Image (spheres, helix red, strand yellow):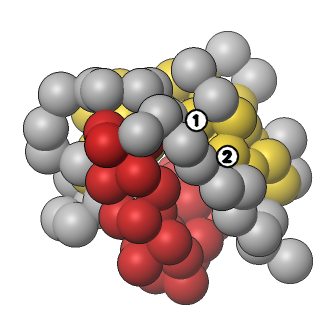
């Protein structure tokens, strides 16, 4: 599973040919969650402070995330995405 971004100890990954809806996986200090790109629905556990940072990053990079999702589904290629600063 490729790592597409890392910031403040938060790791963002996507699987090749993963199930719908489009989403990404997050890890932080042993916590794991899945976040839907379009709706921002979260499955799993993540500290609220960290989840707020993830949502902030998602809002900035939603379009890039969807491009990655479609590209990984089609060709297996992906691009790294800028971290939250």
Query: Which quadrant, please, contains the C terminus?
Result: bottom right
Is residue 58 shown left or right of residue 78? left
Is residue 20 shown left or right of residue 53? left
Task: Tell me which residue sits at (66%, 55%) in the image.
Answer: 79
Q: Estimate the spatial distance between the alpha carbons at disc 1 and disc 2, rounded to whole Å.
A: 5 Å
Residue 17 screen position, x and y as percent: 30, 27
User: To which quarter of the image does residue 49 belong?
Assistant: bottom right
Task: Tell me which residue sits at (63%, 65%) in the image.
Answer: 53
Task: Tell me which residue sits at (58%, 48%) in the image.
Answer: 78
Q: Residue lying furthest top in this view?
A: 30
Q: Is residue 47 above or below residue 66?
A: above
Task: Tell me which residue sits at (41%, 51%) in the image.
Answer: 71
Q: Is residue 16 above or below residue 58?
A: above
The residue where tag 1 is placed is 13
Residue 55 is at least partly visible in this image: no
Is residue 15 shown left or right of residue 21? right
Is residue 63 shown left or right of residue 10? left
Q: Is residue 17 above or below residue 40?
A: above
Residue 21 screen position, x and y as percent: 14, 45
Q: Which mark is residue 51?
A: none
Q: Nearer the viewer, residue 82 or 49?
A: 82
Do callouts 1 and 2 mark residues in contact (Cβ within 8 Å)?
yes
Which label's residue is closer to the chain start, 1 or 2?
A: 2
Label 2 SS: strand
Residue 7 is at least partly visible in this image: yes
Residue 73 screen position, x and y as percent: 31, 39
Residue 68 screen position, x and y as percent: 46, 56
User: To which quarter of the image does residue 27 belong?
Assistant: top right
Query: Which quadrant, please, contains the N terminus?
Result: top right
Q: Nearer the viewer, residue 52 or 36?
A: 36
Q: Which mark is residue 4?
A: 2
């Amino acid at each position: 599973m490729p790592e597409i971004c890392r910031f403040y100890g938060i790791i963002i990954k996507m699987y090749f040919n993963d199930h719908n809806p489009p989403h990404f996986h997050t890890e932080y200090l042993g916590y794991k969650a899945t976040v839907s790109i379009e709706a921002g629905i979260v499955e799993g556990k993540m500290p609220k402070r960290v989840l707020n940072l993830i949502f902030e990053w998602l809002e900035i990079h939603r379009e890039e995330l969807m491009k990655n999702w479609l590209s990984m589904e089609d060709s297996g290629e992906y691009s790294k995405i800028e971290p939250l600063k």
